[in-house]
Image (cartoon, helix red, strand yellow):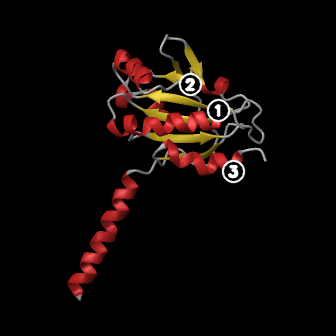
Amino acid sequence: MKKLAILLCAFTLCSFMANAQYENTTIKAGQAAPELAFPNTEGKVIKLSEVAKGRIVLIDFWASWCGPCRRSNPQLVALYNNYKDKKFKNAKNGFTIYSVSLDKDKSAWINAIKADNLSWTTHVSDLGGWQSKPAEIYGVQFVPQAFLMNSEGKIIGKYMTSEEAVKDLDQLLAK
């Protein structure tokens, strides 16, 4: 019985530690979304605050070399296509995605955007890999990872994958 209790405690502790490893503690729901302003694929700096004017924005962190990111991109494309033309409460300009890449290789990044049909126009990266400034600002220590920002510029959700945002996006739809 003692062995079972110890085993149960060890299992619980390991489970807790595994979940804690993947929790972003830098960004909290309800806080203002930190500004991001980084170059797009053509080198033009795109500010999150400009993209977000009157919009719901999914801030999606990913990389071309990340297998789980690439495997989840079809669902991200479906999410974008499903919500891009919908009407949202307090968001007259609808919905978009602000993709932040943790790539170091610009051509790999651009090729992945094309290959995965990531059709939205806001793709940014400082090509810093894990040392990228956007990842530091948002406390990103794993990818994929996403944050949902409302039209007032507040973070309303954080997710291990973008598909987890569907419930929150549905709640923001205009009735």
Identify the mark nearer the N-term, 3 or 1.
1
**Percent of width and height locating residue 41:** 47, 15
Asked whether the residues under the numbered discs 1 and 2 touch, taking CB atoms below 8 Å apart as contact, a structural biologist would say yes
Tell me the residue that label 2 is attached to: 120
- How far apart are the two marked residues, 1 and 2, measured between alpha carbons? 9 Å
Tell me the residue that label 3 is attached to: 171
Q: Secondary structure at mark 1?
A: loop
* 70, 26: nearer the viewer: 70
Q: Amino acid at mark 2?
A: Trp
Identify the mark nearer the N-term, 2 or 3.
2
Residue 127 visible to an observer of this rendering:
no
Checking the image for residue 68, the label placed there is none
- How far apart are the two marked residues, 2 and 3, measured between alpha carbons? 22 Å
Dot 1 surroundings within 10 Å: few (below 14), some, or many (20 or more)? some
Dot 2 surroundings within 10 Å: few (below 14), some, or many (20 or more)? some
Residue 99 visible to an observer of this rendering:
yes
Can you tell which quarter of the image residue 142 is in? top left
Can you tell which quarter of the image residue 18 is in? bottom left
Residue at 34% x, 34% y: name it: 66
**Percent of width and height locating residue 87:** 74, 37
Q: Amino acid at mark 1?
A: Lys
* 103, 121: nearer the viewer: 121
- How far apart are the two marked residues, 3 and 1, measured between alpha carbons? 15 Å
Q: Secondary structure at mark 3?
A: helix
Tell me the residue that label 1 is attached to: 84
**Percent of width and height locating residue 49:** 65, 27
**Percent of width and height locating residue 170:** 66, 48
Q: Amino acid at mark 3?
A: Gln
